[in-house]
């Protein structure tokens, strides 16, 4: 092998590496659009059977059938939002009638109970003064900055949500109206000899992602039932709505379950302000922790193996590494889309690079 061949090989490797880096950077820049496409694709996967039913059985025109399905999903979303209105109204009432002095007394009472439980009976004058200053600053922060920040954050979230919702519905409309829109677009990018392989990959991806999302819905349902039982046992108001919200957090790998746990513990404490810490609050927190532990055991040893091992054929270590790298590159959104995105990549690699040793090893189970 002469020096010219080696130099050409090195230049080719550098060019490929540069192309991969630029592609990843481009995907990073358009990650919001990719999220919209993903959600639209999920809506299309779920809504396509309904469209076919309306067209074949009820003789709906194509456009009307798609519009009905889009309105169905929109109505479903509005219904879910309406479920949370009682919770928001309740919290709004609590904020409007908040007695700062009474709130401070409740904080002091909980602090005393925690100190008793931990055996901290000796408190110096300096500690008392420091504690009072901290409480004063905390209360002032709630009065002057907490509520305005919540309102500003709420406006920003609503703006982003509205833009995302309109974008997803618009894209979903065309995905449902022309089920082969993406397929035909991709076929124009590949040679004629590769078209059959691409069609096979698309069909395989549809099957795997359908299994994945159906399994994910089952996972959320199981957690919803367990969380509902926990919250009803500890006497949290609007237990069904809160349990559903906590179950949805499980979509976020690793972080989501702990957000749900923190929310349930916080609501348990705030639901019993003024009650005895040892006999009321602490046992209820114990029930929450016990129920959360049971839910995670069921999720980790039953739900996830069924979804990831049987549905999309991924090894636990493979899942861990993919989610970790996606989270480092794209944040929480990357963690959410890591598994379905990786599944798509594996199917495509198996179809077009099946002779490669690394690809063959990675895709042997699909």
Image (cartoon, helix red, strand yellow):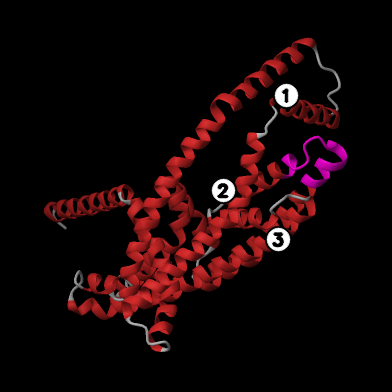
Q: Earlier in the sequence, mark 3 or mark 2?
A: 3
Tell me the residue at 38%/66% (across/down): 41
Q: Nearer the viewer, residue 133 or 114?
A: 133
Q: Is residue 122 above or below residue 118?
A: above
| Label 2 environment density (alpha carbons within 10 Å; few <14, some 14–19, many ≥20) | few
State the residue in front, 279 or 167.
167
Which numbered disc, 3 or 1, marks the residue that appears first in the sequence?
1
Closer to the camera in the image, 31 or 11: 31
Residue 126 rendering spot, x and y as whole percentages: 75, 10
Judging by the rendered image, the residue that carries numbered circle 1 is 101
Pointer 3 residue:
226
Give the camera-side residue of 51 and 111: 51
Q: Which residue is mark 2?
A: 255
Q: Is residue 22 magenta?
A: no
Q: Secondary structure at mark 2?
A: helix
- Mark 3, secondary structure of its residue: helix
Secondary element type, mark 1: helix
Q: How many marks?
A: 3
- How far from the left and from the top, in percent, is residue 107? 74, 28
Identify the residue at image location x=70%, y=55%: 239
Check if residue 275 falls in the magenta segment: yes
Q: Is disc 1 surrounded by few (<14), some (14 to 19) or many (20+) residues within 10 Å? A: few
Left or right position of 348 against 258: left
* Picture layout, residue 59 above or below residue 156: below
Q: Residue at x 68, y 47 (%)?
A: 264
Residue 353 position in % (x across, y down)? 30, 70
Asked if 344 appears above or below 288 in the picture, the reply is below
When the figure is inspected, residue 45 is found, relative to residue 228, above or below; the finding is below
The reply to whether residue 365 is in sight is no
Q: Which residues are magenta?
A: 268-285
* Marks 3 and 2, how far apart at CA: 19 Å
Task: Identify the residue at horizontal 23%, vertical 76% (top origin).
Answer: 194
């Amino acid at each position: 092998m002469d020096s010219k061949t080696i130099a050409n090989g090195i230049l080719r490797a550098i060019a490929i590496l540069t192309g991969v880096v630029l592609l990843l950077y481009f995907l990073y820049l358009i990650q919001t659009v990719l999220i919209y496409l993903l959600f639209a694709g999920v809506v299309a996967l779920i809504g396509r059977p309904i469209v076919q039913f309306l067209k074949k059985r009820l003789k709906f025109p194509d456009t009307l059938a798609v519009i009905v399905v889009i309105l169905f999903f929109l109505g479903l979303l509005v219904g879910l939002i309406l479920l949370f209105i009682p919770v928001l109204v309740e919290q709004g009432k609590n904020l409007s009638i908040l007695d700062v002095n009474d709130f401070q007394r409740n904080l002091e009472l909980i602090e005393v109970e925690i100190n008793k439980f931990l055996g901290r009976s000796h408190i110096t004058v300096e500690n008392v003064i420091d504690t009072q200053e901290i409480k004063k600053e905390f209360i002032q922060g709630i009065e002057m900055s907490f509520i305005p920040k919540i309102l500003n954050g709420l406006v920003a979230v609503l703006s982003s949500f509205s833009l995302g919702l309109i974008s997803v519905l618009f894209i979903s409309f065309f995905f449902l109206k022309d089920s082969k829109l993406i397929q035909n677009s991709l076929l124009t990018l590949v040679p004629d000899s590769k078209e059959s392989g691409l069609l096979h990959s698309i069909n395989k991806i549809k099957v795997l992602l359908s299994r994945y999302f159906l399994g994910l819905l089952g996972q959320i349902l199981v957690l919803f039932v367990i969380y509902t039982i926990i919250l009803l046992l500890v006497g949290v108001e609007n237990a069904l709505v809160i349990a559903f919200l906590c179950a949805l957090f499980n979509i976020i790998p690793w972080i989501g379950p702990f957000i749900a746990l923190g929310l349930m513990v916080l609501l348990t404490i705030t639901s019993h302000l003024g009650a005895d810490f040892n006999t009321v609050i602490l046992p209820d927190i114990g029930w929450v922790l016990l129920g959360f532990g049971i839910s995670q055991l069921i999720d980790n040893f039953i739900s996830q193996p069924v979804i990831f091992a049987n549905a999309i054929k991924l090894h636990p270590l493979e899942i861990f590494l993919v989610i970790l790298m996606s989270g480092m590159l794209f944040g929480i959104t990357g963690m959410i889309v890591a598994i379905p995105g990786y599944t798509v990549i594996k199917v495509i690699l198996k179809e077009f690079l099946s002779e490669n040793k690394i690809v063959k090893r990675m895709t042997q189970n699909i």
